[in-house]
Image (tube, grey):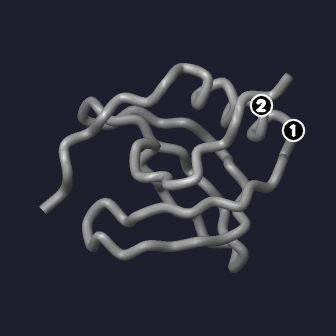
Amino acid sequence: MAQPYIPVPHFIHERFTIAIMCNESMNLHWQDEQSGMSYMGNVFPQDLLEEKGADYVLVKNQDGKMVKIRLDLIRNMPTPVK
């Protein structure tokens, strides 16, 4: 069963928006919303989505596959850019 969504700080949305615009890669560690399994990898953020009251980032993984990650399940949140 999926955990309830916990809203993330706005700077997280801004950080992913910058990564998307710059085609930047990010090393992320996240938990799968359905299975609870943890994943880690170098990914390329593609889009931010909102579904059913939760925010997600759509990323392209190292195999070129698209993966949807719920923002509050990312365990190493990116820091703000200065």
The secondary element bearing badge 2 is classed as: helix
Q: Residue furthest bottom?
A: 63
Q: Are marks 2 and 1 in contact (CB under 8 Å)?
A: yes
> 5 above or below 82?
below
Q: Which mark, residue 47? A: none
Q: Where the C terminus falls, by quadrant?
A: top right
Residue 37 percent coordinates (x, y): 36, 75
- Residue depicted at x 29% and y 70%: 36
Residue 79 percent coordinates (x, y): 70, 36
- Residue depicted at x 44% and y 30%: 8
Amino acid type, callout 1: Cys
Residue 76 percent coordinates (x, y): 58, 52
> 1 above or below 54?
below
- Residue depicted at x 19% and y 43%: 4
Left-right relation of 22 to 17: right
The secondary element bearing badge 1 is classed as: loop
> Total label count?
2
- Residue depicted at x 41% and y 48%: 70
Cα separation between marks 2 and 1: 6 Å
Amino acid type, callout 2: Ile
Near mark 1 (Cα within 10 A), the count class, few <14, some 14-19 or many ≥20, is few
**Snapshot quadrant of residue 1:** bottom left
Q: Which residue is mark 1?
A: 22
Q: Which residue is mark 2?
A: 18
Q: 58 or 41, which is in the foreground? A: 41
